[in-house]
Image: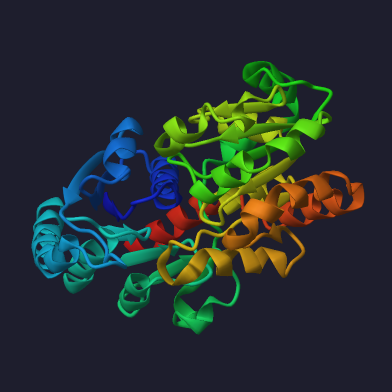
């Protein structure tokens, strides 16, 4: 049996794709899986590290500002469409899966035109244009949020949740002491974990750098701060990073330990939301404004409406974010309620559920 999994661009697409592949292999070890990604993007590094073969397409998205890349876009679409078709013809998959991202469109379009069963995995509460177009020919659409019939044919929708590496986030209570030791944190202090993905998030870093005095005064609180590799040079030596109750890191390689140590989590509102659900800690979401159709705000509001998280707007984060975090830590009832409500949204078996939908189509 052969399956193509296509998409990527960000961790919110890449790691769910790998989780789906792992789940398929667990159910059917004889399956041959080929990934198709976008050249130069995260998947070209992470997928081979996970043990899977990947081929890259020359494809990118439309830039909001006028750039030379935008003039190349029509050519990229033609070239990537042709190459995707060649890959599908050569590999002869029994099914194709799209997880979102630039490479997903041409690959699933090619598979669908050859009448190969296709499955879409939509991670957001507001789907991008590509998935809305691909949905017309898709056999199944696996979603994480309620109300997706506004965008997709109801009969094709299956609510599975977003696939993540669930096993990584199990037994966090047992890992808590080891986590404090690993990060050299003080067990007597309340801990905030703030992160903006592997590259980092400028707004979250600015919020930290602008509140040196506030954190200096709150000696009862400590912050594990993932700055991100992109911003390491700008913030690693700033005044906030030098505080004794702040632990700055360019990149956190043990996310399970970071979540285990945390009493409160601050992050963007992409794929990491589903990690936060599994972890079940109070969370503050700061949606990125630099994403297609502001879908992170819609993701965050889906949790806020269920009293499962708080949201701070990107433009307000510099002034409000850390104050809000300290208020939550100081309100035991609120912190408990947010943690319990977000935990109820967790779907630890999402990857397996999607794998089963794929296998059903092949049968």
Instruction: Tell me the residue at 88%/45% (across/down).
Output: 330
Instruction: Tell me the residue at 82%/49% (across/down).
Output: 328
Camera-side residue of 332 and 49: 332
Where residue 57 appears, as percent x and y from the top left, is 17, 53
Camera-side residue of 306 and 351: 306
Quarter of the image where one finds residue 290? bottom left
Where residue 187 appears, as percent x and y from the top left, is 79, 22
Instruction: Tell me the residue at 18%/48% (across/down).
Output: 56
- Left or right placement of residue 330 versus residue 318 in this view: right
Q: Is any atom of residue 12 visible in this view?
A: yes
Residue 300 position (above or below residue 216): below
Where residue 345 appears, as percent x and y from the top left, is 68, 58
Quarter of the image where one finds residue 357? bottom left
Where residue 55 appears, as percent x and y from the top left, is 18, 46
On-image quarter of the C terminus: bottom left
Instruction: Tell me the residue at 62%/24% (across/down).
Output: 242
Residue 177 position (above or below residue 45): above
Q: Is any atom of residue 171 visible in this view?
A: no
Residue 213 position (above or below residue 103): above
Camera-side residue of 355 and 44: 44
- Number of residue marks: 0
Camera-side residue of 319 and 249: 319
- Left or right placement of residue 223 versus residue 146 in this view: right
**What colour-coding does the image apply?**
rainbow
- Left or right placement of residue 135 versus residue 188 in this view: left
């Amino acid at each position: 049996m052969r399956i193509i999994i296509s998409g990527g661009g960000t961790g919110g697409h890449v790691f769910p794709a790998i989780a789906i592949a792992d789940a398929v292999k667990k159910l059917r070890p004889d399956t041959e899986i080929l990934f198709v990604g976008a050249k130069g993007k995260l998947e070209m590094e992470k997928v081979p590290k996970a043990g899977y073969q990947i081929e890259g397409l020359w494809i990118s998205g439309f830039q909001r500002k006028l750039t030379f890349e935008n003039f190349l876009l029509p050519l990229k679409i033609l070239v990537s469409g042709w190459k995707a078709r060649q890959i599908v013809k050569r590999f002869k998959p029994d099914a194709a899966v799209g997880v979102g991202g630039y490479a997903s469109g041409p690959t699933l379009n090619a598979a669908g035109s050859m009448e190969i069963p296709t499955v879409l995995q939509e991670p957001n509460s507001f789907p991008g244009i590509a998935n809305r177009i691909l949905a017309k020919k898709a056999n199944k659409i696996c979603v994480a949020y309620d109300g997706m019939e506004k965008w997709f044919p109801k009969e094709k929708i299956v609510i599975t949740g977003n696939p993540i590496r669930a096993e990584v986030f199990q037994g966090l209570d047992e890992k808590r002491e080891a986590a404090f030791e690993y990060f050299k944190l003080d067990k007597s202090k309340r801990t905030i974990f703030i992160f903006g993905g592997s590259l980092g998030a400028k707004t979250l870093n600015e919020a930290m750098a602008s509140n040196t005095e506030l954190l200096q005064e709150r000696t009862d609180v400590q912050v594990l701060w993932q700055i991100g590799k992109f911003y390491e040079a700008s913030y690693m030596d700033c005044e906030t990073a030098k505080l004794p109750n702040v632990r700055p890191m360019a990149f956190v390689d043990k996310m399970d330990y970071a979540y285990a140590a945390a009493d409160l989590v601050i992050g963007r509102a992409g794929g990491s939301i589903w990690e936060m659900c599994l972890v079940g800690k109070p969370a503050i979401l700061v949606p990125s404004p630099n994403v297609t159709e502001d879908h992170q705000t819609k993701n965050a509001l889906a949790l806020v409406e269920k009293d499962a998280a708080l949201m701070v707007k990107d433009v307000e984060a510099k002034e409000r974010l850390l104050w809000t975090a300290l208020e939550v830590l100081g309100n035991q009832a609120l912190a408990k309620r947010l943690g319990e409500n977000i935990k109820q949204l967790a779907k630890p078996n999402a990857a397996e559920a999607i794998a089963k939908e794929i296998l059903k189509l092949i049968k």
